[in-house]
Image: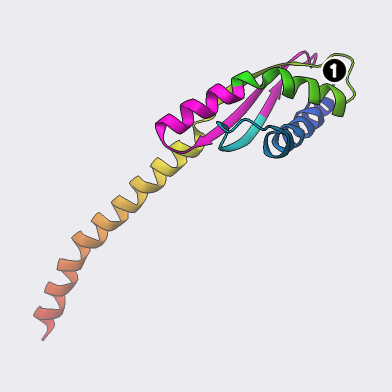
Amino acid sequence: MSQLRVEKVQELMKQEISEIILRELKDPRIGFVTVTSVECTGDLREAKIYVSLMGSEQQVKDCWAGLQSSLGFIRREIGKRIRLRFTPELSFVVDKSLDYSAHIQELLLKIEAEDKAKNAPETDNVKKEEH
């Protein structure tokens, strides 16, 4: 199957799954979930759904359990909404890229603050010597 078609189906599945999770699922365990990407095999028979989960550790565990229990419903809805020869087998994967990027941002801010702290006394000394 052409790579362009696979990419289009992946994007469409991402939109539809996001919509299903947001509007259709009634499970109270499912909280802040973001579908970050979908990867399909070349024959479109399997799809990995990358999700980012927000909340406390217990909320994330509950949300994950809710998502796992709703896989059949989501697959059935995808089959209704997207006309494919075969409805893909779905599996969720936790996407830690948002957590990782937040961690990197914290480190960069910490380094910037340390640099400012190191440079601040030097500029004060230079000003005192000039007077």
- Front residue of 68/129: it is 68
- Front residue of 32/88: it is 32
Quadrant in which the C terminus is drawn: bottom left
- Front residue of 83/105: it is 83
Question: Quick check: 53 above or below 78?
Answer: below
Is 33 part of what is drawn in magenta? no
Is 61 part of what is drawn in magenta? yes
The residue pinned by badge 1 equals: 1
Residue at 66% of width from left, 22% of height from top? 70
Q: Which quadrant of the structure image shows residue 66?
A: top right
The amino acid beneath tag 1 is: Met
Label 1 environment density (alpha carbons within 10 Å; few <14, some 14–19, many ≥20)? few
| Residue 32 location (% of width, % of height) | 56, 39
| Residue 51 location (% of width, % of height) | 59, 31
Residue at 63% of width from left, 34% of height from top? 35
| Residue 31 location (% of width, % of height) | 56, 37
Q: Tell me the element at label 1.
A: loop
The segment highlighted magenta reads: 38-67
Task: Tell me if residue 47 can be seen.
Answer: no
Residue at 68% of width from left, 34% of height from top? 21
